[in-house]
Amino acid sequence: MTFLAIQRQERPWLLSALATAALIGLPIVSVIYLALFPEENAWTHLANTVLPYYLKNTLILMLGVVTLTFLVGTGSAWLISMYNFPGKRWLSWALLLPFAVPAYVVAYVYTDLLEYAGPVQSTLRAVFGWQSMEDYWFPEVRSMGGAILMMSLALYPYVYMLARTSFLDQSVSLYQVSRSLGVTPFVFFYRVSLPIARPAIAVGLALVLMETLNDFGTVDYFAVQTLTAGLYDTWLNMGNLGGAAQIASVMVLVVVLLVSLERYSRRQQKQFNSRNPGNPIPCQTLTGTKAALATTAALLPVLLGFVIPFVVLTSYAFRYFDVSWSTEFVSYATNSFTLSAAAAIITLILGTLLAYSKRMNKHPITDAAIRISSLGYAVPGAVLAIGIIIPFAWFDNQLDAFMRATFGISTGLILSGTAFAVLFAYLVRFLAVASGSIESSLEKVTPNMDMASRSLGHSYLSTLTRIHLPIIRRGALTAMLVVFVDCMKELPATLILRPFNFETLATQVYQFASDELLEQSALSALVIVMVGIIPVMLLDKTISRQEK
C-alpha cells in the first residue's frame, strides 16, 4: 500500500506517527553518528583502558540484580498466589510499595544507617565495647554487593507484579491434574507454573536489566564504575563528548541485546488464558512454623525496600523540617511538578496520536513508526541526554552564527541548556508508557463503534474526541499519572540537561546526599516517595481484579 493509496483522512494520522517517530529516533541516531564520527576519536584509548572495566562491572551488577530480583519477585509472587498465611491480604499489595522508592534513595538511606558513623555500627560498638574497625567486621555497604542489594530492593516489584499476574491466570485444571498424579506443590511450581510464567517473568527481568543499566545515582554514590558512570566521567570530567557518545553506543548495543534476548526467550510461544474467573486455583493454608516463615519471607522485602527507608526519611523530614522547608525547596518542588505535569500532558497527546494512528491506519509504515517511538523507554537516560544535547547544541550554534553574521546579535542557548531539553528527554523516555496504556485501552473498544460513528458522518477526529476519549479516559489518566511519577523520579538525564541553577527534587536529593547531607534533603525524597505510592495503589487495584 503506497502513501497515495491511503485515504485522505488517514494521511494526517500516518504523518503524525512518522513525525513522532522522527523526534524519538533523533537522539539515538545522534549518538550513533557522533560515536562513528567524533571530533576526537577516543575509542582506541577507551577500549584499551577503562571500557573493559566499565563493561565488566556493568555485567556483574546486572547479573547480580537480575538473579536477586528473580528470586525475590518470583518467590513472593508464588507465596501470595498459592498459599494462605497470616498477613497475606495486605502483603499482596505491600510488596508493590518499593516501586515508589527510587533505587538511589534506598542507597542513600542504607548508607546513612550502615556506615561507620551510622546508628547501626555505633550501637554495635557501644553494646560490645568495640573501639575501632579493627575489633570487628561489618560488610561495606558502598560496594558492588551493596549496589546489587539496594537496586534489587527497589526493582523486584517488576518481577513480582508480572509473575503474580501470570500465576493468577493459570488454569485450575493443570493444578488438579498435577495434584491427582501425586505432584508436590514445589514440583508443580518448578515443572508446570514456572515454565508457563516464563514469558511474563522474562519481560519483568528485561525491565529490571534496563533500569539497572539506566541507574546513575546508586552506582555513582557507591563508586561502582559502570558504563553509565563512565559516560558521565568521560563527558563531564574529561570534556570528551565523542568518547561519551562511544560509551553510549555500547550501552545502546547492550539494550538491543537485552530486547533481542527477551523476544528470543518468547519465540514461538503462544499461551491462551484457560482460567475460569470464578474458579481460581485453590490456595493451601499454612499453619505453625510454615506460616510464620511464609509471612517473614513476604514481609522482608517490604520491610527492607519500603518501610525502613520511609520511616528514616519521615524521621529526618520532621527533625530537619525547619532547614528543609525553604524557598529553595518550594522552587525545586515547583520545577519537578511543572516539568512532570507538562511531560505527562504532552505524552498523553502524542501517545493518543500514536495509538489512534495504529487503529485507523494498518499501514506497515505506521507499525514501524510506533515501534521506533517506543524505543525511548529502553534507552538509558544518560544515553538520551547525549543524543539530545548533540542536535540541540548544533541548532543553537548554527542559529547563533547566522544571527551574528546577519544582524550582529547573539541568540545564546535556545534549546540546549534549558528546561525544554529536560522536558524533551522526558517525552522521549516515557512516551512508550503513555502510548502503550492508551493502545491497550483502545483495543477494548469494539470497531463497530468506529463504523457507526463514520456512518453518521463523523470524521476520525470527531470520533476520537466524542466516542473514544470518554471510553478510554481511565486508561489515559492512568498513563498520565505513571508518566508523571516516572518524571518525578528521573535522575540521569535531568542531571546532564538541566540549566544552571535549576534543580528538581531528584537532583536536590542527589546533590545533598553526595555531600553527606541526606537529612536536609529528606523532605524532598519523602515527597518523591509519597507521589510514587499513587500508581502502586492503581497497580494493586488492577491485579486484584484478576483474582476475582
Image: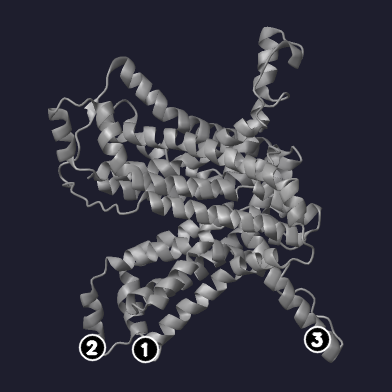
For this rendering, which residue is in front, 422 or 181? 181
Q: Is residue 2 left or right of residue 129?
A: left
Figure check: 324 above or below 402: above
Instruction: Kindly identify the amino acid type of the residue bearing the numbered disc 2.
Output: Leu
Gap between marks 1 and 2, in whole Å?
16 Å
Give the residue drawn at x 46%, y 32%.
301
Q: Residues within 10 Å of mark 2 (few under 14, many from 20)?
A: few
What SS does tag 1 mark?
Answer: helix
Instruction: Kindly identify the amino acid type of the residue bearing the numbered disc 3.
Output: Met
Task: Say the numbered circle drawn on residue 403.
Answer: 3
State whether residue 325 appears in this view. Answer: no
**Residue under numbered circle 1:** 9
Gap between marks 3 and 2, in whole Å?
53 Å
Nearest to N terminus: mark 3 or mark 1:
1
Task: Say the numbered circle drawn on residue 456.
Answer: 2
What SS does tag 3 mark?
Answer: helix
